[in-house]
Amino acid sequence: MEGLKPEDKVLIYSIFDLDDDTFNAGFPIVLEKAYSGSLTMDEYIALIKMQIQARVFDIVLPGEIDNTKVLGAINTRIAKIHNGEIDEPNGHSMISNEGDYKMLPEEKQVYMRIENFRQYEQHYKNRLQYISEMKEEGFNAHDELFRKYYKAFDTEMATVTAAYYSRLTAEKCGFCSSFLHAWRGALYSISLTGDIEASADGFGQLKSSVNANCSDGNITGAIDRLFAKNLDNMIAEYSKRAKEVREMERETEQG
């Protein structure tokens, strides 16, 4: 491709499609970008492939790769993606990890971090939308949000949900029904113990914001009490499920 800088060519082309001058000029810049978290996930995978090819075919890289620094940079990038600071493009690159092309443990650790991010990427996009829209005055399309995929109901989601709930009047009962239905339905789709426990904590935080002890005889007070009771039940369900999953994980580890 005409007009591409050496560092762009290093990321786009196979090593065998590059001349030595281009590779030697572009690789150090790619490495600098890798350590600063400036590469996309596909580009980080391209860097892993370079390491594998160089090892298999005895090619000396013009710079030693510190995969611990690469992993730290990826974690920093992921945090910025989750916070909405970076818009990560959809990625498609993969590594077969077979035969001579097997990754070393430190390379595989980097690759698996990227794969883990991709597995839950939709959750973080939906989570950002959830938090943003729940904060909006006049927003009332909560049913649409509840139909999306989430891997957990964390405490930040609980905070904005509590504020949203406090603004509701006649819609409170419908909201409670939709919320409880959505998260009871999600219980067995959440696969990690930590996410199940985080959700239980989130429900606990939400429950603490609900006026569960109101006894003024009003309809709103009755809805609050019923919602708090149902949240208590759901916390118990999630806590029980977390124990079950932890036990299954322990049995798997023991073989």
Image: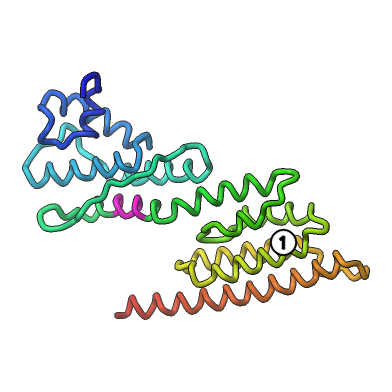
Q: Residue furthest right?
A: 216
Report the number of discs: 1
42, above or below 157, in the image: above
Write the residue at 58% across / 64% down: 199
- Return the x and y of residue 197 as percentages of the image width and height: 55, 67
Q: Give, as a single range, the part of the protein colored magenta.
A: 109-115
Q: Main secondary structure of the magenta part?
A: helix
Q: Residue furthest left?
A: 58
Write the residue at 32% across / 80% down: 254
- Return the x and y of residue 175 as percentages of the image width and height: 72, 61
Residue 147 image-quadrant placement: bottom right
- Return the x and y of residue 250 as percentages of the image width and height: 39, 77
Amino acid residing under circle 1 = Phe
In the displayed structure image, the side of residue 9 where residue 250 appears, left or right: right
In the displayed structure image, the side of residue 208 where residue 8 appears, left or right: left
| Image quadrant where one finds the N terminus | top left
Residue sitting nearer the eye, 106 or 79:
79
Q: Which residue is mark 1?
A: 175
In the displayed structure image, the side of residue 133 where residue 42 appears, left or right: left
Write the residue at 58% across / 60% down: 153
Residue density around tag 1, few if under 14, some if 14–19, many if 20 or more, within 10 Å: some
| Image quadrant where one finds the C terminus | bottom left
The magenta stretch spans residue 110: yes
In the displayed structure image, the side of residue 217 where residue 98 appears, left or right: left
How has the structure been colored for display?
Answer: rainbow
- Return the x and y of residue 136 as percentages of the image width and height: 70, 43
Circle 1 — which element? helix
Residue 239 image-quadrant placement: bottom right
14, above or below 215, in the image: above
